[in-house]
Every structure is written in structure tokens, then in C-alpha cells.
Image (cartoon, rainbow, N blue to C red):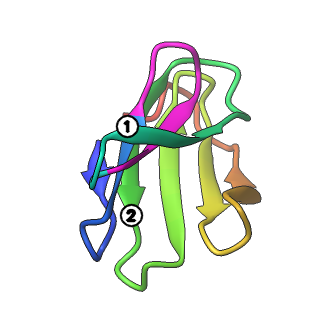
Amino acid sequence: MTFSLNNLVLFTNYCDNTIKVWRVEDWSLIHSIEGHTGFVECVAASYCGLYIASGSCDKTIKIWSISDDYSLYWTLSEHHNAVK
């Protein structure tokens, strides 16, 4: 899990292959990011505040655009094992 750069949002990896986006102010779920086909092992926010990256048991890293409603920006898929 990781906080956004401004600490207003928390991103958590979840056992249903998604990333959950939580508003810290009231701990409400504001978005569920889908796209991995395996358990999401890790999530990190970029220093610029525009992207988050997630690694999964599906052997991919996915980059998500925060400013574009958490849409998939890029997939890196040449890994031989789960990305942790």
C-alpha cells in the first residue's frame, strides 16, 4: 500500500486482483482499479503524482494514470515470475 503524494488518498493492493483507492479524510472507497489477472503484490505512487504502478502474480507491472480516472497507461509484461 502507499499514500498519494499529498496524503489525501491511500492505494491498497487487494486479494481480488484489484487496487483500491481510499479517500483518507473519511476512509471511503472512491475507486477500484481492475486489470490484473493475478493477486496484486505491490503498489507505488510516482513522485510526480500522476501515476501509480502495480506489480502482480500475473507477471506484469501496470502503470495507471491518476489524472485519467485511473485508466491503464502501460503494461510491462516480460517478467518470468510474480512481481513483488
The C terminus: image quadrant: top left
Residue span colored magenta? 13-23
Q: What residue did someone put label 1 on?
A: 12
Q: Is residue 7 left or right of residue 76?
A: left
Could one spot residue 23 in this view of the protein?
yes
Towards the viewer: 68 or 38 = 68
Quadrant location of the N terminus? Answer: top left
Q: Mark 2 points at which residue?
A: 45
Taking 27 as reference, is 4 above or below it? below
The local secondary structure at tag 2 comes to: strand
Q: Where is residue 6 in the image (x, y as percent from the top left)?
A: 28, 76
State the residue in front, 8 or 16.
8
At label 1, which amino acid type do we have?
Thr
Q: In this view, does 33 lie above or below 76?
A: above
Q: Where is residue 24 in the image (x, y as percent from the top left)?
A: 28, 52
Is residue 21 on the magenta stretch?
A: yes
